[in-house]
Image: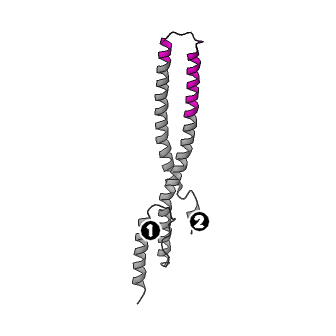
Amino acid sequence: MNKIRRRFIVDPKLQYSLMTALLAVFMLASGTFYVTMSFALLEVHATVGALQLPQEHQVFSDLQRIENAAMVAFTVTFIGFAILLAWGGLYLARKIAGPIIALRLHLERVTNGETDADLPFRKDDYFTALQTAFNQHMGAYRRKLTPL
């Protein structure tokens, strides 16, 4: 199998653009969630403020503790999902780009007269129907080339 098939980054342009698109959508969703969470906390502050409790009341320290815990949870979740989406975008794009690159390389070999081998895909690549159809086509082509 060709060296390019063993690399994780097989088509940087495709893989990085898909990863960037996924991260942009994630950032938009995360920003929306953050703003929503902030408005909800402002509403809680307004409700507590309307009670006209003294500033040293327990409810204010509890509210601050809840806000801090929510911010830590948001930050950890945000970083974790950003890493997961970056890796997932690269991985998904590899599953798409890998078969296309394999097909291109195989077509170059066929162009150079190497018609014996079938098109190789990794077992978990996408587009296996393309691989099957191409290999069937090449089998029929080989049979036409081979005299009986």
Q: Colour scheme used in the picture? A: one colour
Mark closer to the chain start, 1 or 2: 2
Of residues 84 and 142, the one drawn nearer to the viewer in this rendering:
84
Q: Which residue is mark 2?
A: 3
Q: Image check: 129 left or right of 90?
A: left
Q: Which residue is mark 1?
A: 131
Q: Residue visible at 42% across and 66% down? A: 130
| Mark 1: few/some/many CA within 10 Å (<14, 14-19, 20+) | some
Amino acid type of the residue tagged 1 in the rendering: Gln
How far is the residue under mark 1 from the one under mark 2?
Answer: 19 Å
Q: Is residue 65 magenta?
A: yes
- Quadrant housing residue 141: bottom left
Position of residue 117 measured from the top left corner of the image (x, y, whole percent): 50, 76
The three-letter code of the residue at mark 2 reads: Lys
SS of the residue under disc 1: helix
> Is disc 2 surrounded by few (<14), some (14 to 19) or many (20+) residues within 10 Å?
few
Q: Which residue sits at x=58%, y=37%?
A: 76
Residue lying at 50% horizontally and 13% vertically, measured from the top left: 49
Q: Main secondary structure of the magenta part?
A: helix
**Image coords of residue 124 (percent x, y):** 50, 61
Span shown in magenta: 45-74
Residue that appears at 55% across and 38% down: 77
- Give the answer, above or below, for where 24 lies relative to 134: above
Which image quarter is the N terminus in? bottom right
Of residues 62 and 135, the one drawn nearer to the viewer in this rendering:
62
